[in-house]
């Protein structure tokens, strides 16, 4: 499989501490943030997948990740590292960071 | 009959919520505003002109104009007359606008929030509708 020269890959993980896990509002915030990046972004509950499109609100909500789950991110594209960094930061901030820029 | 208009933002696909009950429509719109934000044009309507439960073609038409976006508008309905009256309201629009309005086959509350989330990320009309309909694909 050929890869775009500019494409880069990034991986990251963090512990989900939000008291109710991935309920509606955190899922929406995560999806909205993922959509700001041009990279393809996936979320998974294990470092070997299965991977879910982090830009799909229905699929992220369907993960129903509970509190104390380790969440993994994988991204591919020119801003992959930024995307993973921002998503990890969102979870580490317990979704307190504003979605407005 | 009740129509409420959100702030004028039209770079994203608009959302119109049509329920037999103004309380349901307003409640779903409140969820969109609080959970998704204000980047999406949003209008809701519910109730018949006499103050009872029902839907009104006039009110839906007003809501469609209120939430209008050049990128299109998706309509979330609860049941029966809400859908047929929405189709009638869409028929009243000028032809160019008509092609950019779709009624989603999705539950009204969840569909509104999901569609708005997709719209807020800048997705086009088809993607916004598909996102709402993806929630319960067998409906």
Image (cartoon, rainbow, N blue to C red):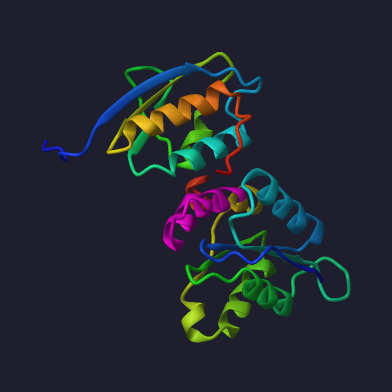
- In this view, B66 is above or below B138: below
- In this view, B72 is above or below A73: below
Q: Residue at x 66, y 19 (%)?
A: A19
Q: Is residue B4 left or right of residue A65?
A: right
Q: Residue at x 35, y 44 (%)?
A: A38
Which image quadrant: the N terminus of chain B?
bottom right
Q: Is residue B64 visible?
A: yes
Q: Position of residue B129 (x, y in %)?
A: 48, 57
Q: Is residue A42 visible?
A: no
Q: Residue at x 49, y 48 (%)?
A: B138
Quarter of the image for residue B19 reads bottom right
Taking the magenta stretch, the answer to whether it contains residue B121 is yes
The residues colored magenta run: B113-131
Q: Is residue B6 left or right of residue A46?
A: right
- In this view, A11 is above or below A26: above
Q: Position of residue A99 (x, y in %)?
A: 58, 40
Q: Main secondary structure of the magenta part?
A: helix
How many numbered circles does the render carry? Answer: 0
Furthest toward the left, the residue is A2
Quarter of the image for residue B87 reads bottom right
Taking the magenta stretch, the answer to whether it contains residue B2 is no
Q: Position of residue B17 (x, y in %)?
A: 66, 61
Q: Is residue A96 left or right of residue B11?
A: right
Q: Nearer the viewer, residue B49 or A83?
A: A83
Q: Residue at x 33, y 37 (%)?
A: A79
Q: Nearer the viewer, residue B133 or B8?
A: B8
Q: Position of residue A56 (x, y in %)?
A: 45, 42
């Amino acid at each position: 499989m050929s890869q775009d020269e500019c494409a880069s890959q990034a991986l990251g993980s963090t512990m989900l501490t939000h008291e109710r896990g991935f309920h509606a509002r955190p899922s929406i915030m995560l999806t909205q943030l993922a959509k700001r990046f041009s990279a393809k972004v996936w979320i998974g509950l294990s470092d070997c997948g299965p991977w879910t499109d982090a830009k799909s609100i229905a699929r992220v909500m369907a993960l129903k990740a509970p509190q104390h789950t380790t969440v993994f991110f994988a991204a591919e594209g020119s801003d992959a590292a930024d995307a993973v960094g921002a998503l990890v930061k969102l979870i580490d901030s317990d979704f307190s960071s504003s979605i407005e820029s | 009959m009740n129509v409420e208009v959100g702030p004028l933002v039209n770079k994203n696909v608009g959302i119109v919520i049509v329920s037999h009950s103004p309380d349901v429509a307003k409640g779903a719109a409140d969820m969109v505003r609080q959970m998704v934000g204000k980047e999406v044009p949003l209008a809701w309507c519910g109730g018949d002109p006499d103050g009872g439960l029902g839907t009104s073609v006039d009110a839906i038409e007003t809501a469609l104009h209120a939430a209008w976006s050049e990128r299109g508008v998706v309509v979330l309905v609860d049941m029966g007359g809400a859908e047929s009256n929405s189709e009638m309201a869409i028929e009243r629009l000028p032809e160019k606008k008509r092609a950019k309005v779709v009624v989603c086959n999705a539950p009204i509350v969840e569909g509104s929030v999901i569609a708005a989330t997709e719209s807020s990320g800048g997705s086009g009309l088809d993607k916004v509708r598909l996102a709402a309909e993806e929630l319960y694909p067998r409906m």
